[in-house]
Amino acid sequence: MDNIRLFLIMALAYTGYLLWQAWQQDYAPAPAAHEVSQSIQAADADQAVPQVPDVAGIDGATPQTPEKKAAGKTATGSKIITVTTDTLKVSIDTLGGTIVETLLLKYPVSIQQPDVKYRLMSRSPDDFFIAQNGLLGGKDVEAPNHEALYRAEQTEYQLAEGKNELSVDLQWTGANGVKVTKRYRFTRGSHKVELEHIVENASAAPWQVREYRQLQRGKPANTKSKGMISRAFVGGVAWDPEDKYQKYDFDDLKAGKLDKEVTGGWIAMIQHYFLTAEIPPTNEPRHFYSKGLANGHYVIGEYSPAVNVAPGSRHVFSGSIYMGPKDQDTLEQIAEGLDLVVDYGWLTLLAKPMYEILSWINSVVGNWGWTIIIFTILIKAVFFKLSEASYRSMAKMRNLTPRIQALKDRYGDDKQRMQAAMMEIYKKEKINPLGGCLPMLIQMPFFIALYWVLMESVELRQAPWILWIKDLSVMDPHYVLPVIMGISMFIQQKLNPAPPDPMQAKLMMALPFVFTIMFAFFPSGLVLYWVMNNILSIAQQWVITKRMEEQAKAA
């Protein structure tokens, strides 16, 4: 029994350490948002963007030559176009029509900085992340890739009151008369942006082109997993009907491990709480690819088959790009499998139903703090009988403490004879030595699954509870909940039988203090769950212990 208890203590402590370590990594200070500097001119843009990926040059498609690109830049230069809706503020460079910055207007960086919006995409070196797209022509055919210069009628676009859509058109015209319109279409209340390349062939010859779209980003710091529990994944992901959801870390992207033909899928770069995804039409074939660039950046992309546009005709390449939060309800409506970017890890089978139950409770009570409390009560009700058996076993063990102490006095350091005598008492009193430990071990996966739900669900980001708890996804700023948790843990220990081994007894006495310090850095929502669980456990255990003591006296 003592060895089992010690193992449980060590397992609980190690699990707590891993959770704390993962939380510390995930909640490292995020880069502050900033406006795109107007000083980022075409020359800087040239250094920031790579050449069109080699994989997109299959079947005779080649990028625009550097000479043509440089000539276009020298003639007019590039500009930054700013597009503002109720949900997004997007900066687009006319050099390539590339999205070089995205601010999420409904998601502040922190509660303390409500006016500073979360920056999802940026051309800043410390968190480089952009969305490139364009067309590739056949051999010796000029086509507007992400290094071509577009024209725009204005540099500021804003979704007007009473309007639900806003279109931003970028124009490019080739020397042979081919005209391409790159059209971004924004919708009120949405983080999804429709993107079209409208090709109008006014030349006298057929024009063969393919469309490509790619996400390019630098590698953030601290993306490696540590221990048994991984931090929130940062990197590339893809989904297709055959292989379903696949993750690609930065080493995988560099090695070009994504290289497949797909019909009906999507690609994305994801991070904690947010993502950017390229979503082609479901009924059109695409080639998915990845690669590493010489500048140290990483690319995940897709391109279409080559299309022949006859003289005097037009063709439209369509698709959408999502730049926003990992809102599961929204994502599953946009594309099949897109909600899987909310990754609960190896406990998804437990975490997913937990999230659904939590969401339903929150839709009724409207507060995530009270939602966690109600959910804890439900979990406690599910395990009521199991916990009752555990507490009965502990109460019996507590009643046996004097007899165990007598055995210790009798046998001294002869642990073998003492263990045999203890097992004889357990057998006679019908006590299962595992009875007090097994229920806690069974509930451990539920605790870890809830950790992932609280970590991955953007709905809990900056969600308040009461009084000083303004954000359940970050630590308690005044350490009130961790202290209450430590006190409740200490009370629980007093209700349990003390270990006969003095060393284990000292270790048990130290645990409340150790866990208080550890939980001080946990998300307050998780600490709230633990506190509520402890309070309910204390109440249940106290009632059962009193009953058992009264029964023992009556006997």
Image (cartoon, rainbow, N blue to C red):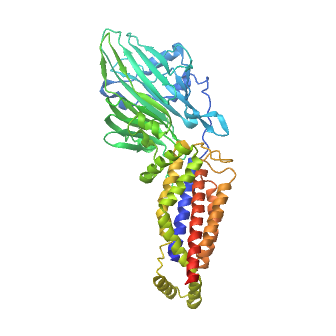
Number of numbered discs present?
Answer: 0
From the top left corner, tell me how far across and down residue 504 is, in percent.
59, 75
From the top left corner, tell me how far across and down residue 165 is, in percent.
49, 21
354, 217: nearer the viewer: 354
107, 288: nearer the viewer: 107
Q: Is residue 263 above or below residue 352?
A: above
Residue farthest to the bottom? 410
From the top left corner, tell me how far across and down residue 299 is, in percent.
44, 35
119, 179: nearer the viewer: 119
143, 212: nearer the viewer: 212
- Asked whether residue 373 is in view, the answer is yes
Residue farthest to the right? 478
Residue farthest to the front? 554
> Which residue is depicted at the point 55% across and 79% down?
551
Query: Which picture quadrant has residue 258?
Result: top left
> Which residue is depicted at the point 53% across and 88% down?
414
From the top left corner, tell me how far across and down residue 39 is, in percent.
61, 23
Query: Which picture quadrant has residue 18?
Result: bottom right
Q: Is residue 13 above or below residue 278?
A: below
